[in-house]
Image: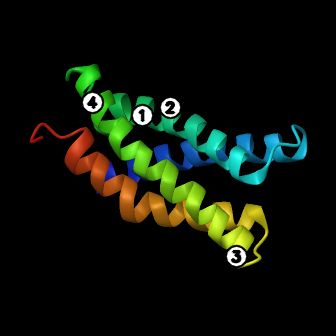
Amino acid sequence: MITFLKANIASLIASLSDFIMTVLLVQWGKTAVVTAAASGTITGGIINFLIGRHWVFRAGDEKAARQLWKYALVWTGNLLLNTGGVYVLTSQAGLHYTLSKVMTSLLVAFLYNYPLQKNFVFSNNC
């Protein structure tokens, strides 16, 4: 249970970074929503990997290159799911980009990221 709570704190920090980057790029950088969402996801991914490796799963003793490769694989799916979700909810469903970003991020975090990080990226079993 503690690991799950720590993972959610890490996810919240990463998601806030992701969200802030997305909003800054759209509002001040005049960047397209999907490009901004992808950039935010990249920022959040880097932050989440570092926090997950060192604090959440305490896997700093494992080889970083192996974890990074596995994380990159999972993160690529994360990027596609987040960017696709924002696109569908914004362009197709007509939701405001901030609402679609939050909804997509939460679904992907709970249903995709946590299980794969726990059981694949930072696990000694794989």
Q: Earlier in the sequence, mark 3 or mark 4?
A: 4
Which residue lies most toward the bottom here?
93
Residues 61 and 83: in front is: 83
The CA distance from mark 1 to mark 2 is: 5 Å
Which badge, 3 or 2, comes first in the chain's sequence?
2
Q: Is residue 61 above or below residue 113?
A: above
Q: Which residue is rendered at x = 88% and y = 43% of the image? A: 30
Q: Position of residue 108 (x, y in %)?
A: 46, 61
Q: Are marks 1 and 2 in contact (CB under 8 Å)?
A: yes
Q: Residue at x 58, y 44 (%)?
A: 41
Label 3 to label 4, Cα distance in Å?
36 Å
Q: Position of residue 66 (x, y in %)?
A: 23, 26
Residue 49 disc label: 1
Circle 4/circle 1 CB separation < 8 Å: yes
On the image, numbered disc 4 is attached to which residue?
67
Crowd rating for badge 4 (residues with CA inside 10 Å; few <14, some 14–19, many 20+): many
Q: Which residue is mark 2?
A: 46
Residues at badges 1 and 3 in contact (C-beta under 8 Å)?
Answer: no
Q: Looking at the image, is 49 positioned above or below residue 61?
A: below
Residue 32 location, x and y as percent? 79, 48
Q: Which residue is mark 3?
A: 92
Disc 2 element: helix
